[in-house]
Amino acid sequence: MRTMLRTGGRRVKGSRKPEPDPGEPDHPQKGGRKLSVSGVSRRARDIVSGKGDSAKAQRMALFTFGVRVFGAALAYFLQVFLARWMGSHEYGIYVVVWTIVIVLGVIAPLGFNSSVQRLIPEYLAFDRLDLLRGILSASRTIAMVSATALMLVTMAVVWFSSGHVPDYYIVPAYLAALCLPMFTLTDVQEGIARSRDWGDLAIMPTYIWRPFLILVVVLVASLTGLPHTATTACLAAILATWVAALYQKISMDRRLRHLVGPGPARWAPGDWMRLSLPIFLVEGFFTLLTSADVLMVSYFEPPGEVAVYYAAAKTLALVHFVYFAVKAASAHRYSRLHHSGDHEGLAVYVRQSVGWTFWPSLLFAGLLLVFGSYILRLFGSDFAGGHNILAFLLVGVLARAAVGPVDALLTMAGEQKRCAVAYAGAFAVNVALNVTLIPYFGLIGAALATSISMCFEASSLFWVARRRLGISSFIWTGHRSGKRTTHGE
C-alpha cells in the first residue's frame, strides 16, 4: 500500500503506459492542422462513441460542463429568487450562515472526498478488492463522524456566542448546522462517483437536486404563509440537503454492489490519513480563501451590504464554473498520466486543460463587464452598485483561469503539501488585506483584497508546478517546460 502511495514521480510497478487514443495525440505536434467539416465530424464521433480513456474523459468533461452550466443557471436563479423573496437584510443573514456551512462542509471530509479519486482507481487496477471495500466504507463513515462533531461544535459556539453576535444570526446558524452531516456525505460520495465516471451521481446531487429542492420547498413555504425570512430558507436547505444526500447514497450503494460485490474489507487508516490530510489542508485553505471575503464583510458590515457583495461574487460564478468543470473532469486523468510515467502526455493534457479553462472564462468575463450591472439588478434595486465589485473580482478569477486547474494537478501528483502552503499563504494575504482595506474602502476593499490574493495564489501554484513537475501551466507559455525536480530533491 505504502509503495503505491509513495511512487512520487516514478512509474508504478506493474502499470502500463497508456496507449494514445485515436484522434487525440498524446504528444505535441509540430505545425497546425486545418479544420474541416469532416474532421470535426470525425472528432465528434470519436468523443461520442470512442472507448478509450480520452473519449471517456471528454464525455465526462462535456457532461460535467453541461450540468455545471445548467447548475450555475439554476443556482443563480435560486439566489435571485431568495434575494427578492427575503429582501437584502434577510438574504444577507442567509448567505452568511450558508457560507459557514460550505466552509465546514469542505473541512469535514478530512480530504477523503478527493483521496478516494486516487485510491479507488489504484485498488481496482491492482485488484485489491479488500482495500477497495474498506475505503468505500471508511471514507463515508469517517466523514460523517467528523461532520457530526463539527455540527455539535458549531452549535456550542453559537450558544456561547449569544450576546456577542447580533441576535438575527442565532436561529439561522443553529438550523444551518443541521445540514453539515448530509452536506459532507454528498461531497464524499461525489468523489467516489467521479472515480468511476458516474457523472449523474457525481454532480447532479450538488448542482441540480439540492438547489432545485430548496427552490421547491421555499415556494411551498411561501404558499403556506410561512414568513419570508432566513430561518425559513434554512429550513428549506435542511430538507433539500438531506433528501439529495440520501437519494444519492441509495443509488450509489446499488451500483457499488455490482462493482465490488460482497467480501472481506480491510482498513488502512494510517496510509489513508497520510494521503488525505494534505488534501484536506489544500481544500480547507482553498475554501477559506474563496469564502473569507464574505465572512470578513459580515464582520465589518450589516447584512444588507453582505448581500450586495455576495450577489456580485455569485454573479462571478457564471465565469468561475468553467474552472471548476474542467478541474472536476481532469483530476483523475492527471493522476493516471502522472503515475504511469507519461510526463510528456501529462504536459500536453495540462496545456489542453488550461486552454479549456482560460478562453471560455475570458469570454464570459467580457460579457459580465458589459452586462454585469443589468444582471445584478435582477436581485433588486439595492444590488445595482455591485458592478464595480464585480470588475475587481474578475481580475482574480482570470488570473486563476490563466493557470488552469493546476491545484488538481499538484494534488494528483503527490504535491498536496506544497499546494496547501500556497493556499495558506494566499489565505493569509486575503485576511490581512481584508482587515486593512474593508474599514477604509468597504466592499471595494474586500473585492480588491480577494483579487490580489487570487493572483498570489495562481502565481504560487504555477511556480510549484513548474519547479516540482517541470510543467508550465500558464496559458501563454506554449510548449515550454521547466526542469523537473524529483520528489527526493
Image (spheres, rainbow, N blue to C red):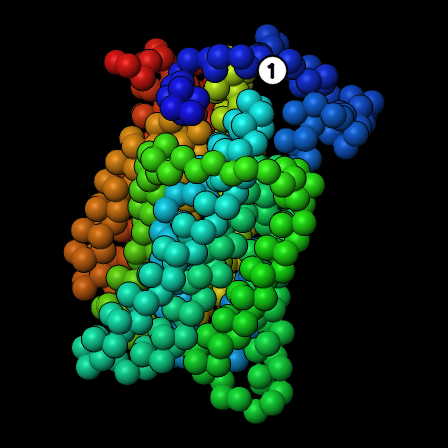
The residue shown at (63%, 31%) is: 57
Q: Amino acid at mark 1?
A: Pro
Residue at the extreme front of the image, as rendered: 264
Above or below 64: residue 26 = above
Crowd band around label 1 with a 10 angstrom C-alpha radius: few (<14), some (14–19), many (20+)? some
Please identify the residue farthest to the bottom as the structure is shown.
225
Which residue lies under the disc numbered 1?
Answer: 18
Can you tell which quarter of the image residue 197 is in? top right
* Res 303 → quadrant: bottom left
How many marks the image carries: the answer is 1
Residue 472, horizontal then vertical, whole percent: 41, 21
Q: Is residue 474 visible?
A: no
Q: Residue at x 58, y 61 (%)?
A: 246
Q: Position of residue 108 (x, y in %)?
A: 37, 53
Measuring 54% from the left and 27% from the top, which residue is drawn there?
A: 128
User: Could you say whether the residue bearing mark 1 is in a helix, strand or loop?
Assistant: loop
Q: Is residue 42 left or right of residue 3?
A: right
In the figure, 118 relative to 441: above or below?
A: above
Q: Position of residue 75 (x, y in %)?
A: 56, 61
Is 175 displayed left or right of 296 in the figure?
right
Depth check: give the residue in front, 419 or 79.
419
Image coordinates of residue 456 in percent, x first then y, are 29, 38
